[in-house]
Amino acid sequence: MGAAVRRARLARLRNPAAAVALCLASLAGAAPVVTAATAAPVTTLPQGLDRVALARGLDAVRDAGMYGAYASVRDGVAGWDGATGVADLDTGRPTRPGMEHRVGSVTKSFTAVAVLQQSAAGRIELDAPIGDYLPDLVPGERGRRITVRMLMNHTSGIADYVPQAFPSLARGSAASLDEFRHRTLLPATLIGWGLDAPQVFAPGTDWSYSNTNYVLLGELLREVTGRDPEEVITRDVIRRAGLRHTYFPGTDPLIAGPHAKLYESFHGLIDPPRDYSEYDMTMAGTAGALISTPQDLNTFYRDLFQGGLLPAAQLREMRTTHPVTDDTGRVIARYGLGVYTVDTPCGPAWGHDGSVWGAGTTALSSADGGRQFALGFNLGKYQLNDAEGRPVPHPVDAALDRLQTLALCGAGAPVPAPPLFAPPQTDPLEAPLAPPSLSSAAGQRLR
């Protein structure tokens, strides 16, 4: 999440239980739902692509301490692709612009689109209780009070399963990351961990980022279609958008195409950082297992926000948001249904960030789908923590902020102060929500 690079994780993902194990900062009290119409007015119109400046901006991310990064910008028919740094520390192999990458919680946008498509077809009612569809997975009063919409916008109050999936993190140890590298998990197991943990708040009364919500949405797709959710998302979203390098790896721990090694530091806990590019991503499923490229992510969000994947009514539902605040109560983003919006000098940007062990991703688009920016990087949670366990801003964060502003708004646009993207939090599916992104507070999913 910086966002995507630090994925600046979605504004301090909030979950008290996960905070102990994953340093997820808790958010302030509930705030009323707002819509995109409340976004800050445009102050600087987007300008054309300055390819020289973009290349320098990406190199500045490397010079600030990132191992490697690859990015893509699209503006109308114009485009720019770039890469910097190394993909393999041992060999010195350089990064390349089209490398495949684990995109973590960006997966949530794809899952949300598939759910909204089924809603448009009349098979899913957004405000119906999830217990109507999945009574065995979410039984009793909880199933009657939590709606599909609450799962999609993280107001369900269901805890994140990540602390239970990686128990050593609560003890200040990264041993679980290695112990479970080749572990295959069923969605029901992940959901059970999330539901067995204490409810974070009463359904619909607050906001707390939870990967459990999106694994449940995957099972909802299975229930209403009779097919594996990854298969549904592939058919109805990935193929429909014409994406050629985007796929769910299933139980295969390898990335199929050319890719960088993904090094995880976990805020200095792993020293030197270790390569986690080989990993069984059933731990993330429909919440964060997707592999893609910056180019494919730009194509996806362009198609989405220009109306190619959803009817207008469902796209409006997707853009109905809930405020996301940092520890001071400042609104740093607004979360919709599988996407969030942040203010930039040239108007609101929409998309998502993500992080998994060793990888951070940010993917954002202008509101009209005319301009996109996507970036991946290969050093996760590079910031050190302060005495309270919070990531200390790193020079990479500032470089990511500058690059994102340049990519979305063009040369000459002022970088917001305070920065749009804060250090990413630790949500393996969104965690390191690393470069600028929501998941980090401006930045992390298996965000």
Image (spheres, rainbow, N blue to C red):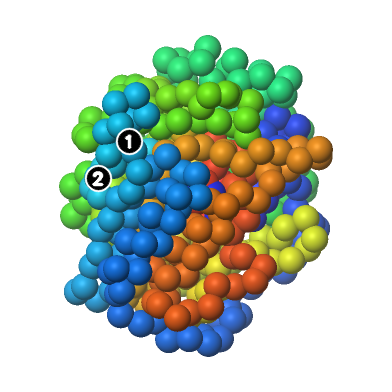
Evaluate if marks 2 and 1 touch, with contact meaning CB atoms under 8 Å apart.
Answer: yes
- Mark 2: secondary structure: loop
The quarter holding residue 122 reads bottom left
Q: Position of residue 374 (x, y in %)?
A: 37, 57
Q: Is residue 405 left or right of residue 89?
A: right
Q: In 3D space, how far apart are the residues under numbered discs 2 and 1 (Cα atoms)?
A: 8 Å
Give the vertical position of 344 relative to 211 (above or below): below
Residue at 66% across, 19% down: 173
Give the vertical position of 71 relative to 199 (above or below): below
Q: Position of residue 187 (x, y in %)?
A: 48, 28
Residue 328 is marked as none
How many C-alpha atoms fall within 10 Å of the one at disc 1: few (<14), some, or many (≥20)? many
Q: Is residue 213 visible?
A: no
Looking at the rendered image, the quarter that the C terminus falls into is top right
Residue at 45% across, 30% down: 263
Q: Position of residue 158 (x, y in %)?
A: 67, 40
200, 294: nearer the viewer: 294
- Mark 2 vs 1, N-terminal side: 1
Residue at 35% across, 69% down: 53
Q: Position of residue 400 (x, y in %)?
A: 49, 57
Q: Amino acid at mark 2?
A: Arg
Residue 87 is marked as 1
Q: Which residue is mark 2?
A: 96
Outermost residue toward the top? Answer: 179
Residue at 45% across, 64% down: 404
- Mark 1: secondary structure: loop
Q: Amino acid at mark 1?
A: Ala
Q: Is residue 381 visible?
A: yes
